[in-house]
Amino acid sequence: MKLSKYPGCILAICLLFANIVATKAQDTWSLQRSVDYALANNIDIRQQVVQKRLAELTLKQSKMAQIPTLSGNLSGAYANGRNIDPNTNSFITSAVTSYSGGLSAGATLFNFFYQQNTIAANKYQYQAQDKLLEKAKNDVAFNIATAFLQILLNIEQVHISEVQVKLTVDQLENTKKLVIAGSVPESNQADLEAQLATDSVTLVNAQNQVIQSTLQMKALLNLSFDQPYVPQIPDNITEIPLPRLDEVDPEMVYSAAKSNNPQMKADQLLVKSYERSYAAYKAQMYPTLSASGQAYSSYANSAKNTTLKTATPYSVTVGQVDVNGVTYDVKTTGYDYTYNYTTIPLGDQISNNFKQTLGLSLNIPILNGWTFRTNMQKARLNIETQKLTMEKDNQKLRQDIYTAHANAVTSLQKYYAASRGVDASQKAFDFATKRFDLGLMNTIDYITTQSKLFNAQINKVSAQYDYIFKMKLLEFYRDQKIAL
């Protein structure tokens, strides 16, 4: 199937597409609405929020580490056979059920330097994560604005393409009449039908670019792809406020960016964090004085109270003696005792077995496999690495600003040149139209002139949006915010 034979079908498809898009558009999205939605739903921002919360938890834990430790324990045991009585430490042959419990506490009396420097390092880490979150929000806002401008540019290109198609359709209809009247050859009609097919394909491609840029915007917003997104188009794109080039001098922008750029602030905070980490590792090489205490008690069912039950007297003959021919019995007397055994009550056992200890310990690091010293050296290298990273980021920021300024100057020159090109192409097309209507120009030359105007219009729109983007980029570097 040749497209040149079916220009009306292609145009109908394009118009149907436009109607479908218009039908689905229930509301419009302004740039501010898009940015606000992205700040709440963008995945990159949500990931950075998680990183900030992790840093906050680390900081909180390091602060709580200053509080003395306190722990409790409770244990129970059952033993049968030959056991050691937990109360008398003597061997017994019996089943024994025992329980014990206690509280232990500890505190560091000296070498708070490690804890204090660790807290300070984690504090700077948390502040750095906060700045990185701010950077992520700024980056997303700028990306949203860039995508928003791209959609507007693509929509504008669709409008230009629609005008081009309509113009070609009008010329084709007029040429058909002239062919029927025999004023122009039929080849003129065929050439315009071919041009209409080309213009229609260009329109479809432009509409597809709108779809593609809209999908990119939805990805940035983390918006469902089946949910409509229609940008709120400004009344006049030329009225978007832009700074003058002298207001965004690269050195001035760089000076402002150094003081308000979140990445620069994060780099500075990370250097401070690593410096405090170095001090913390260095403090580990100092002696540590700690205090500890314990309260303990126990209970066992083998612990008994013994009470006298009965005392029965007895007399036993143990022998006889002969005294002057008289035999006497020798007896011994005494008492047989019986006892009552009762388990000592729980409260009494806890009171009787209650004991407390208090101790001091001094830990002096002497040889530990060079661990502490290695950690300290690694922390020092981390400082150097972060300082180099900060220098690199600073250098890149300056380079990006100067590059953006040079691109803005170039974009402005391109826009001026494209504007002059549109004016010249429009004049040439107007003259060509008059000559073509009078039969003084062939169809191929006329189509060529028309294509030059179309390309000039596209180039002007592209240059205009490119200039807006470049100026907004410089404005973003300077103020860390963007608006249309």
Image (cartoon, helix red, strand yellow):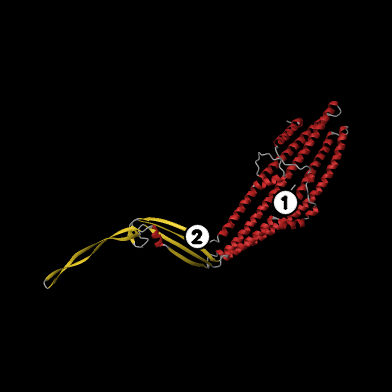
The residue furthest bottom is: 324
The spot of residue 233 in percent (x, y) is 75, 42
Q: How busy is the neighbourhood of tag 1: few (under 14 within 10 Å), some, or many (20 plus)?
A: some
Q: Amino acid at mark 1?
A: Lys
Q: Nearer the viewer, residue 264 or 203?
A: 264
Pointer 2 or 1: first along the chain:
2
Q: Quadrant of residue 455?
A: top right
The spot of residue 99 in percent (x, y) is 40, 57
Residues at badges 2 and 1 in contact (C-beta under 8 Å)?
no
Distance in Å between CA atoms under marks 2 and 1: 50 Å
Q: Amino acid at mark 2?
A: Leu
Mark toward the viewer: 2 or 1: 2
Q: Secondary structure under badge 2? A: strand
The residue labelled by disc 1 is 481
Residue drawn at point x = 62 percent, y = 56 percent? 126
Q: Which mark is residue 70?
A: 2
